Image (spheres, helix red, strand yellow):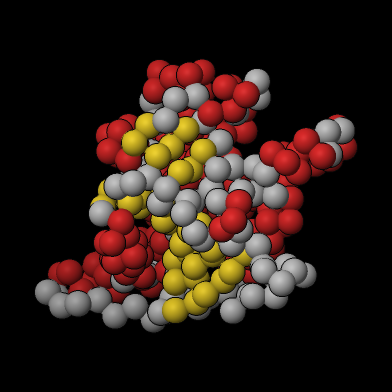
Amino acid sequence: MMNDIANTDSPRLLRADAAGIATLTLNRPAQYSAIDSAMLDDLHAALGEISADKRVRVVVIEGAGKAFSPGHDLKEMLANSHESFVADLFRRCCDVMLAIQRIPQPVIAKVHGIATAAGCQLVAACDLAVAANDARFATSGINFGLFCATPGVAVSRDISRKRAFEMLFTGDFIDAQTALSWGLVNRVVPLDQLDAATNALAASLIDKPSRVVALGKRFFYEQLEERIDIAYKIAAATITHNMLGEDAQEGVAAFVEKRKPHWDD
């Protein structure tokens, strides 16, 4: 447990580990788990620790209380309206989103209530997302004169261009079913089934060999931004390395021999 990650009576981030899953809880329920600078630091540190922890196979990020997160703590931003603070805040936010992509473990957003602005960005930055049917999403900064530029990076890479443009330029909310149809989340379930659905998705990942999952995640994001010819070169090198490794050798042999594979991790 990482309950001492912040030097406050109520830690801004909680970590709980069980059965290969590390759950990170944004823990500011009175503020709907708004993301302040201390929480960003805690998230970045936790992801760094998890990256090197081979016991962790999947990461789940959730919010405490009534919501996933409304995004950045606007009160903190208003109280520190000078370039050095604001520029550093958004740089650290970007570092957290990149850390989610770069750690070897898949990261699942477990969403209930609202996920707006940087909260919506966090959902989009995660590899997978499971939402309760009460979840709502928005990049609503434009309604308050603050265009959601950093959320726009993740959102525009998850959903189609015109839908991302609509979210970013209207600031309107979309419900969970719309988020599902647009590709922002993978599953929508009743709120009382959110834990079970998230755990089931995590279990399906834990069942796979961790080295191959890590290799696949690295490949997925590396090729995504490349021209298609370069992407295929990366793919060919990746699958060659994978096929000659012990996991694929065991898995393919098990398929041929009609038995269950035995992973050594």
Q: Is residue 196 left or right of residue 89?
A: left
Residue at 48% x, 19% y: name it. Answer: 170
- The image shows residue 174, relative to residue 245, as above or below, that is above
Q: Position of residue 23 (x, y in %)?
A: 49, 68
Is residue 227 among the parts visible in the rendering? no
Residue at 60% x, 51% y: name it. Answer: 31
- The image shows residue 8, relative to residue 61, as above or below, that is below
- The image shows residue 55, relative to residue 150, as above or below, that is below
Residue at 29% x, 80% y: name it. Answer: 262
The answer to which of 5 and 34 lies nearer the viewer is 34
The answer to which of 51 and 153 lies nearer the viewer is 153
Q: Position of residue 196 (x, y in %)?
A: 29, 66
Q: Position of residue 126 (x, y in %)?
A: 48, 49
Is residue 28 among the parts visible in the rendering? yes
Please tell me in which quadrant of the rendered image residue 211 appears. bottom left
Q: Position of residue 195 (x, y in %)?
A: 34, 65
Residue at 15% x, 78% y: name it. Answer: 259
Q: Is residue 184 left or right of residue 45?
A: left
Q: Is residue 243 left or right of residue 40?
A: left
The answer to which of 196 and 29 lies nearer the viewer is 29
- Which image quarter is the N terminus in? bottom right
